[in-house]
Image (tube, grey):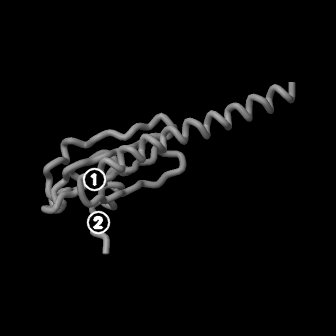
Amino acid sequence: MTSALVTFAVIAWLMQIALGWWQLQRFNRAFESLCQLGTVGVGRSGGRFKPRVVLALAFDAQQRVCGSMLMRGLTIFAQPKQLTQLHGMHQQQLCPDVIFPEDRACQTALSLAITPKS
């Protein structure tokens, strides 16, 4: 009985590692494609027991959004998705409270992504 539990725990742990690697590969591919479009701003919301949000925006030379990625979730099945409603907007037009009125985590991630880096 004990060996079966240990075997199950090891298999579950190995599956977690494999699926986490798979998720990281999907994120890296999406992020790499954003980096090819222009300057990228990244924001992330925290939270241990709430869905985390990672938001990345690519800006062209005129500071307009030319690419985007939103990844949110609690599990390794979270996938990067585009925010096409932001494409073409100027960096100064991006107001987190207006774009995500009900989602505090997305507001935090967006405000960090549009903050100018020095």
Q: Residue type at mark 1?
A: Gln
Q: Quick check: marks 1 and 2 in contact, CB under 8 Å?
A: no
| Marked residue nearer the N-terminal end (1 or 2) | 1
Q: Residue furthest front?
A: 36
In the rendered image, residue 103, in percent from the top left (x then y), is placed at: 33, 46
Which residue is located at x 40 percent, y 48 percent? 53
Say the numbered circle drawn on residue 115.
2
Q: Residue type at mark 2?
A: Thr
Question: Image check: 20 left or right of 94?
Answer: right
Question: Is 7 or 94 nearer to us in this picture?
Answer: 7
The number of callouts visible is: 2
**Is residue 94 depicted above or below 3 in this figure?**
below
Which residue is located at x 48 percent, y 40 percent? 23
Question: Label 1, label 2: how many angstroms apart (C-alpha)?
Answer: 20 Å
Q: Secondary structure at mark 2?
A: loop
In the rendered image, residue 69, in percent from the top left (x then y), is placed at: 31, 46
**Front disc: 1 or 2:** 1
* Residue assigned mark 1: 36
* Badge 1: residue crowd in 10 Å (few <14, some 14–19, many ≥20): few
Question: Is 86 or 62 nearer to us in this picture?
Answer: 62
Say the numbered circle drawn on residue 13.
none
